Amino acid sequence: MAIALTLSELAQWIDGDIIRGGLDVSLTGMAALDAAGPQDVSFLGNEKYYNQFLETRAAAVIVPRGVTEGPPSTALIAVDNPTLAFSVVVRHFAEIARAFAPGIHPKAFVDPSARLDPEKTCVHPGAVVMAGAIVGDGSILGPNSVVGTDAVVGKDCHLMANSAIRERCVLGDRVILQPGAVIGSDGYGYEFSGGRHVKIEQVGIVEIGDDVEIGANTTIDRARFGKTIIGEGTKIDNLVQIGHNCVIGKHCLIVALTGIAGSTKLGNYVTVAGQVGTVGHITIGDKATITARAGVTGNLPGGEIYAGNPAQPYRDEMKLRAFSRRIPKLIERVKALEASLGLRKSGSED
């Protein structure tokens, strides 16, 4: 694929309308509005950046429909969703930067019994593919990544540096593991016996659906028995812990520093904000949203926003917080009433 895009090519890709600019405008890069140069494409995805838009030096800007004016030398393409449309540009230039170069680096180790096509996969130095493992065509194994014994990696996956898939775990197609992600670490299982904690063997696996992305240093524990499951299209941020035997639905969003305890089930399209914690063995319904730093201690129906610790419907939590802010004034009123009735000496702190 050629590096440069013309304005007409880009408009066709993103289903946009050129409202200003020549069809042959050449676009060779992408950048934010305030950093874009005369061959870059940028986008206006939020009205708070409108002043940057008016001052940008970009060759072209993807704008929401209804915007017709901009910097005099900048071409404009109108679309329904500029942020989503700009992702097409990102993918174009990211594919160029990806520079897929098939082959197995001489400093990588691939067990003879592993199944991968060296002409259709890219294995970087230090990567290890253990016995019986399968790696699909188009996949990239980054430096020092590990594919464990009998593990399966689907097509067009990208395992970045120092990520690891332990034995027998399964990745679907187009899965991305950011650096340091660990799939299939042992679940946290112990029994107290004879004055000490005795490890309970974790013999299940992790199964990850297609188009899942897992952030840096996130860990997903293998099941004690059976499977820990991450559904198709789910996106998991950095530094997330998902316990053994959890079932995470399709197209969920799980944000950084979240901890989901074992055997918890999330429905489809659930959003879990940063620093949320859950107890184990609970169910959170489809399309639930858990706001930041909430503590989930019981089952939650879907289709609603939850906040607080313990988590409850957002409206109820906001009322509770409003009431709590009134407590100091209410105490002063009670003190004044008690003093007026002679039940309290003036100035008493009790």
Image (spheres, helix red, strand yellow):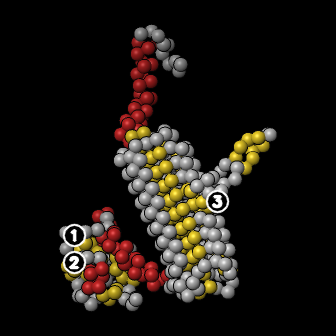
Write down the residue under mark 1.
65
Res 194 quadrant in image: top right
Residue 189: give x, y in percent of width and height. Answer: 67, 49
Res 140 quadrant in image: bottom right
Residue 120 or 310: which is nearer the viewer?
Answer: 120
* Quadrant in which the N terminus appears: bottom left
Q: Is residue 249 above or below residue 335?
A: below
What's the amino acid at mark 1? Arg
Res 23 quadrant in image: bottom left
What's the amino acid at mark 2? Asp
The residue drawn where x is 35% and y is 47% is 303
Write down the residue under mark 3.
185
Write down the residue under mark 2.
17
Q: Callout 2 environment at 10 Å: few (<14), some (14 to 19), or many (20+)?
A: some
Front label number (2 vs 3): 3
Q: Is residue 39 above or below residue 319?
A: below
Residue 253: give x, y in percent of width and height. Answer: 44, 58
Q: Is residue 13 left or right of residue 142?
A: left
Give the mark nearest the N terminus, 3 or 1.
1
